[in-house]
Amino acid sequence: MLIGKDFLTVHDLEPLGVLDLVKKADSMKAGLPPQVLVNKTVALLFEKPSLRTRVSFEVGVKQMGGTCIFLSNSEVGLGIREPESDVAKVLDRLVDCIVARVFSHSSLEKLAANTDLPVINALSDKGHPCQAMGDCLTIFENKGRLEGLKLAFIGDGNNIAGSLALACSDAGMDFSISSPEKYQLPTEIWLSAKKLSAKTGSKLDWNPDPKEAIQDADVVYTDVWVSMGDEKEKEERLNTFAPYQVNESLVEYAKPDFLFMHDMPAHRGEEISEGMLDHKNSVVYQQAENRLHAQKAIMAELLSS
């Protein structure tokens, strides 16, 4: 299911591996998780604040019999207090897995290159593959499939959108993104998703008009307009993205039984209207819970031996 020792991007899954991982996570949610982390310690190395990611990893590790150590940015100082290579080589002798939430994806790559331990991406500027796996599990639970569905992402072509584009393309799900031209998906991610979609027969498109992008969507997804690290651009972004708010009027263009999704935290009155998180079609809290089960499946794959 996983190609190598790490899970840094969706590309670390074997071709068509998204559905396999989702099914494994679905099975774990239905029963007791395998106790593959007994006598094992997982280091959570977080440069950025977190609610869902930290809690879901800590709970998941404990449910699988393991122990967690949380290391904040002030304690480690990746690349500042100590280079990533030194941190990796020290942890290599003390723990069994590194889960890292970092500003720069290159930090993940440096950690992975300097240890034989599994390294899991708990968010970087390039992607959030654990989020995408939890999202696909949520869609699978509600729709019974992934292939042949359409997900419309409205807003910034950021790390969340990038991981979703890759995951959807691998699973045979159409991915339509609507964003201002300046905020499209990075070319590298777009081309990678195109290659995957060509193999699965899914569609990938960008449309500046959210009403057109959301047409007949099975899933409507959005994220914050100002991500961590983009605070200096806040005023410009709020003005630019104003026409891309997901609200009760916009979702009328989706299928009647669409799912509304948001990775959270959410900013009511910005990317969503006040009532969208509690909309009758919203699955955002189920989505948050499913991070736990998707991540257990990932850790089981990497740490079962």
Image (cartoon, helix red, strand yellow):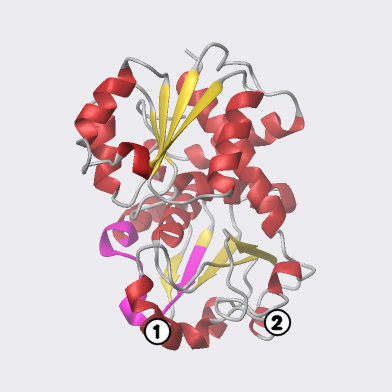
* Residue 220 position in % (x across, y down): 61, 68
Q: Residue at x 60, y 39 (%)?
A: 56
Mark 2 neighbour density, 10 Å: few (under 14) some (14–19) many (20 or more): some
Residue beneath disc 2: 248
Q: Residue at x 63, y 37 (%)?
A: 293
Left or right: residue 21 compared with residue 33 = left
Report which quarter residue 258 is drawn in.
bottom right
Give the Cα separation between the discs numbered 2 and 1: 24 Å
Q: Is residue 117 visible?
A: yes
Mark 1 neighbour density, 10 Å: few (under 14) some (14–19) many (20 or more): few
Q: Residue at x 58, y 33 (%)?
A: 58
Amino acid type, label 2: Glu
Report which quarter residue 211 is drawn in.
bottom right
Q: Residue at x 22, y 39 (%)?
A: 81
* Residue 232 position in % (x across, y down): 33, 75
Q: Which mark is residue 235?
A: 1
Image height of 94 relative to 259, above or below: above
Comparing 14 with 87, the one in front is 87
Q: Is residue 22 visible?
A: no
Image height of 15 relative to 221, above or below: above
Amino acid type, label 1: Glu
Image height of 159 relative to 231, above or below: above
Residue 173 on the magenta segment: no
Range shown magenta: 175-190
Determine whether the residue tagged by mark 2 lies in a helix, strand or loop: loop
Determine whether the residue tagged by mark 1 lies in a helix, strand or loop: helix
